[in-house]
Image (spheres, grey):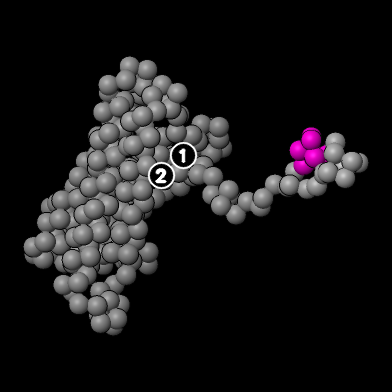
């Protein structure tokens, strides 16, 4: 086993994790009010209204597909009597659709950023590094999904997924990743780079998502007219 393979697939993932956690904590401590998307909706809203939802929903399903594909062993789907052909077809259709949506949405957002001068002026140096990495990660992931699921030439659940799960038990299965096709290694390496950049880019706004609003209780209030009309027998709570 080469030293470079050990460094890439046995050491680098933990360094990225440390940078991701420490960088996120530093950002929260010293730039708490900077955990935003730096919205440019006031400059242009039509393309944003299309590209934003398509990108975010596509990315959400991409992440969900990665969670299932990487964390659920093949033995589980075999125990559930799920045929391999059905699993591949689902990965091809659902994963391909999610990947295409994320790529299309990002393409619209990047076109908007390039074509609208006011939006382009808000692009930071970090964004100029982030966007190419994010776009390449999505395109490489889409390629692995379409090529792998369509041809069946490589079963990532017996290679990449095994390596990924081995990281959680602090015993990296380096050969499992080292023997994967180059496109899977490329996608994984760029994915680690993306997570290393995450705390220092606009992606950090994911930590500020207003999830509390989903469980926030209704606000009960009285209008001025209702309060004034209570004495006349016409008021009430709304």
Q: Which residues are magenta?
A: 222-227
Q: Is residue 162 visible?
A: yes
> Of tags 2 and 1, which is closer to the observer?
1
Residue ID at (27%, 21%): 115
Give neighbour class at mark 1: few <14, some 14-19, many 20+ (Cα, 10 Å): some
Tell me, yes or no, whether the highlighted magenta stretch contains residue 160.
no
| Residue 76 shown left or right of residue 158 in the figure | right
Instruction: Establish if 14 lies above or below 42.
Output: below
Quadrant housing residue 156: bottom left
Quadrant housing residue 228: top right
Cα separation, mark 2 vs mark 1, equals 17 Å
Q: Is residue 128 visible?
A: no
Q: Is 57 in front, or is 21?
A: 57
Q: Secondary structure at mark 1?
A: helix
| Residue 221 shown left or right of residue 205 in the figure | right
- Residue that badge 1 annotates: 205
Give neighbour class at mark 2: few <14, some 14-19, many 20+ (Cα, 10 Å): some
- Quadrant in which the N terminus is drawn: bottom left
Disc nearer the start of the sequence (2/1): 2
Q: Is 231 in front, or is 53?
A: 231
Where is residue 212 drawn, in percent x and y? 58, 49
Residue ID at (55%, 35%): 32
| Residue 35 shown left or right of residue 167 in the figure | right
Instruction: Establish if 40 lies above or below 91.
Output: above
Q: Is 9 in front, or is 90?
A: 90
Where is residue 35 drawn, in percent x and y? 50, 35
Dominant SS type (magenta): helix
Residue ID at (16%, 72%): 85
């Amino acid at each position: 086993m080469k030293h470079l393979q050990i460094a890439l697939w046995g050491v680098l993932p933990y360094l990225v994790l440390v940078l991701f956690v420490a960088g996120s904590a530093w950002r929260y401590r010293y730039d708490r009010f900077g955990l935003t998307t730096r919205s440019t909706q006031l400059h242009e809203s039509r393309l944003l209204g299309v590209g934003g939802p398509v990108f975010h929903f596509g990315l959400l399903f991409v992440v969900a597909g990665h969670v299932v594909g990487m964390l659920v062993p093949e033995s589980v789907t075999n125990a559930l009597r799920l045929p391999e052909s059905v699993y591949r077809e689902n990965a091809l259709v659902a994963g391909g659709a999610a990947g295409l949506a994320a790529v299309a949405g990002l393409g619209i957002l990047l076109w908007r950023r390039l074509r609208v001068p006011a939006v382009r002026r808000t692009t930071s140096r970090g964004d100029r590094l982030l966007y190419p990495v994010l776009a390449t990660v999505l395109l490489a992931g889409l390629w692995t999904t379409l090529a792998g699921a369509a041809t069946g030439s490589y079963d990532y659940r017996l290679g990449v997924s095994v390596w990924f799960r081995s990281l959680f038990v602090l015993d990296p299965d380096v050969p499992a990743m080292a023997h994967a096709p180059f496109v899977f290694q490329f996608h994984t390496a760029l994915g680690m780079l993306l997570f290393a950049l995450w705390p220092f880019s606009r992606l950090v706004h994911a930590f500020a998502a207003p999830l509390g609003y989903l469980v926030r209780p209704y606000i009960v209030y009285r209008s001025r007219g209702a309060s004034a009309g209570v004495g006349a027998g016409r008021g009430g709570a709304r």
